[in-house]
Amino acid sequence: MGKSIHRLINEAELFSGLAKGDERCFDAIYNHYSNRLFPFVDKMVRSRNLAEEIVQDIFVQLWINRHLLENVQYPTAYLFNIAANKTLTYLKKISNNQKLVDKISAGYLDYSNDTEEQLILKESAKIIEMAVAQLPQQRRLIWELSRNEGLTHQQIADKLGISTSTVNNQLGHAMQHVRTFMNNRTGLLSLSIFILLSDR
């Protein structure tokens, strides 16, 4: 545990250094992450050349937007968020076929069984839990019945003795709060977060 925390602190410090324009920090981040991002992107695009191009683009974007990195708390999740978003954005540009996008998303779910992606999903889930904890009592209960217990809107309404329109309204407000909270924490909404937040 101590070793993991120490690594996280070092990575956060590297991002902070990069935010100040330190090229050595950029090189260290590139060397540390490029080989980890490549198989993640390659799994979705199934093209080595395209995956290499996207990974290079990720780091170009990272350098251009380095001033935004001062307070990044979860460097690994942050970079994989960028990778997921950039990859899906590219795929959507080259295909108007929704089935392809769905297939890519399904492939991501399969890939997320790997240890690295499990860590990212766990980090995202923890932040979502923090957001949900801030919800008003009834709104939080409705969220938990929907997300954790898998009840339909009608079942929640019957269980709590309220209307389905109230359930819909409360879940809508809860979703907006969680999305805003996630954006403020990570700066992005990745595919992994979308999967965690999407309706079941």
Image (tube, grey):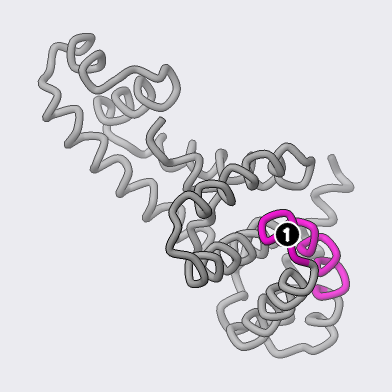
Q: What percent of the width, then of the height, locates residue 140?
A: 32, 29
Q: Specify the principal SS of the magenta part.
A: helix
Q: Is residue 199 above or below residue 150?
A: below
The residue lying at 69 percent from left, 42 percent from top is 112
Q: What percent of the width, then of the height, locates residue 32?
A: 86, 67
Which residue is label 1 attached to?
Answer: 46
Q: Does residue 159 appear anywhere in the picture?
A: yes
Q: Is residue 102 above or below residue 184?
A: above
Indicate the secondary structure of the residue bearing disc 1.
Answer: loop
Q: Quadrant of the C terminus?
A: top left
Q: Is residue 102 above or below residue 154?
A: below
Between residue 73 and residue 116, name the one nearer to us.
Answer: 116
Q: Which residues are magenta?
A: 29-47
Q: Residues within 10 Å of mark 1 (few under 14, many from 20)?
A: few
Q: Is residue 199 shown left or right of residue 193?
A: left
Is 14 a magenta residue?
Answer: no
The residue lying at 48 percent from left, 72 percent from top is 93
> Which three-letter amino acid code belongs to the residue tagged 1?
Arg
- How many numbered markers are drawn? 1
Between residue 19 and residue 198, name the one nearer to us.
Answer: 198
